Image: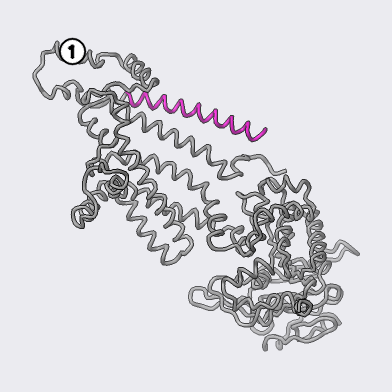
Amino acid sequence: MLQKKEAETARRDALDISGLSLAVSRSGTDVPLLAGVSVRVARGETVGLVGESGSGKSLTSRSALGMLPRGARTTGGVTVSGVDVLGADRRTLRELRRTRVSMIFQDPRASINPVRRVGDYLTEGLRARGVSSREAAERAPDLLDQVGIRDPRGALRRFPHEFSGGMLQRVMIAGALSTEPELLLADEPTTALDVTTQAEVVGLLKTMQEAHGTGMLFVTHDLDLAAAICDRIYVMYAGRIVEEATGASLFRSPAHPYTRALLEASPSVHGEKAVVKAIRGRPLALAEAPSGCSFRDRCPLAEESCAEGVPPYRAHGASTVACLRPEEVAP
Amino acid sequence: MTMARTFATRLGLRALGAAVTILLASLLVYGSLFLMPGDPVLALTGGRRLTPEQIEALRHAYGFDRSFAQGYLDWAGGVLHLDFGTSLTYQSDVGALITSRLDVSAPLIAYAASLALLFGLGLALLSAVKGGRVNRAMAVVASTATATPPFVSAIVLLAVFAVGLGWFPSTGAGDGGPADRLWHLTLPAIAMALVSFGVLSRVGHAAFTEELRREHVEVARSRGVGGAALITRHVVRNALAPLVTVIGVLLVSLFAGTAVVETAFGLDGVGSLLISSVSRRDFPVVQGIALIAVVLFVIVNTLVDLVLPLVDPRAAAGRKAAP
């Protein structure tokens, strides 16, 4: 019986977002934010969700917690380890957040209540799911120790302002993993940190995730970083997924003009000094994107046919891509 | 620098500041005797014909013939030993007189403060959490309450609940034990609390709304913390710092508010004693009450300053940078 249940758990995905469309109503008019977004994270898998600000990547990751904007209307489905998130009532959602999904946010200093002690933050998740305060307090030093905080017992009694940003992000990671979730959502977890601290935190996150067998959705605007740590990557543009590929192949042979432009826009440390090419135009939200392919206004390869409807997904090389002519991007 | 040491230093500085404030205020309070129109001896004798010698004798007996400096030193010296002098009208010790009136005023102030805090903060929280239509309705209630001076609300309450409906007594503080006292003090307490309630519900709404928008509240929600725990641990707790200051000021203003309300409801409290003493030129009583009000104000403000770092650990750390 138990074995059967375990097998079932292993089979089912940590996160399955399928065809998620989301719109909010602002002063009477509908503003679409996401269109047909499908993202899957298997247990133990690291999946990147890459895009510029406004592309809807944070919104997509938050949908896994059932944290949607006020008045949002959705179609499609969001399932977290078998639980239907969009149809869940308040109680089920709360239970889900306490036991199955944890999120790590961008700015640890804003994310941790400044007037409460670090120990309080750390064990809040445990206590919310019914662990007694005493037992939570007993587990707390070990949790901090795992994320490499020295003198964990002393640290528990200190306040957030007594820590550096990097240390606080470690505290947040420890707090997120304290409940042994099946899915970890990391929303730009290193953007607010120094470069040196970034590498440490990413390394720690990866180690912890592997040790706990947690599925991770890593949301970032940094394609290089995503390619380095993710098994698979989704590239998002204007509320849509435009390409999906494994981390390595995406980096080697991008199939979507946007992915390629993103790679060319980031300066490389290795190899010759390539010219950094900025993408012309500015990133668009779904509501202001043109008809047809959202990227066509900024795309160097755009033709008239690109305006004739949203390009369907097709396989090209190792990628699944929403572009009419990927062969011209990566021949 | 250790935390205990900084706390001791702060305490010392605050105490020094408080002492200076009280000293200056006592000069003003005593000096008001010389600014007040009317002669206390004439007020006392009630217009009876007296010879200049008799008037002079009375002046001397009450000490009105002393210079400002001499009079102040005598008075302040007595105050230091908790001797506020003798009332001109009651011929009894001012300290004892005020203390006996506190039997009515203290419960009245406590009652009004409880009402203002409970309903003010309760409404603030409700309108912050619900927002929208609830908030707009609460804003109207709060503005009306804030804009209604105690003498108006006292009259309205008396007309409706005492005279019209007869639910509450119109005068007196009752003498049949705590329940009777509470019943008698209900209308006066409401009249007194109304303005504080209005102010508190708006200030509280602003503070709670701001805290509700904080990212750490969203983060707590993402961890499945919800309902009462979320509100008390992450919203109310964090809003305390800005609220403590306002609450302190409001509490002191309630003490001042007793003057009007006690007179309107025929209560023998400190406030009505102040009003009657002013009209009778009973200077020792007026000075005593005024000085107590000042001391109360200073004490509450000092307490607020000392409590703030306990409420917000960042304030305790001052500008010390994070390691």
Q: Residue at x 86, y 66 (%)?
A: A274
Q: Position of residue A129 (x, y in %)?
A: 64, 63
Query: For this view, does A314 lie left or right of residue B296?
Result: right
Quadrant containing the N terminus of chain A in the rendered view = bottom right
How many labels, in total? 1
Chain for disc number 1: B
Q: Position of residue B277 (x, y in %)?
A: 24, 30
Query: For this view, does B149 lie left or right of residue A184?
Result: left
Residue A303 seen in render: yes
Quadrant containing the C terminus of chain A in the rendered view = bottom right
Residue A300 seen in render: no
Q: Position of residue A98 (x, y in %)?
A: 65, 66
B13 in relation to B167, above or below = above
Q: How is the image coloured?
A: one colour
Residue picked out by circle 1: B56
Furthest residue to the left? B49
Q: Main secondary structure of the magenta part?
A: helix
A313 in relation to B200, above or below = below
Q: Position of residue A257 (x, y in %)?
A: 77, 78
Work out whether residue B60 or residue A287 is closer to the camera in this orientation and state it. Answer: B60
Helix, strand or loop for disc 1:
helix
Q: Which residues are magenta?
A: B1-30
Q: Residue at x 51, y 38 (%)?
A: B305
Q: Amino acid at mark 1?
A: Glu
Task: Check disc 1: other Cα within 10 Å, few if <14, some if 14-19, many if 20+.
Answer: some
Locate residue A302: give its quadrant.
Answer: bottom right
B140 in relation to A150, above or below = below
Furthest residue to the right? A271
Determine if the magenta segment contains residue B15. yes
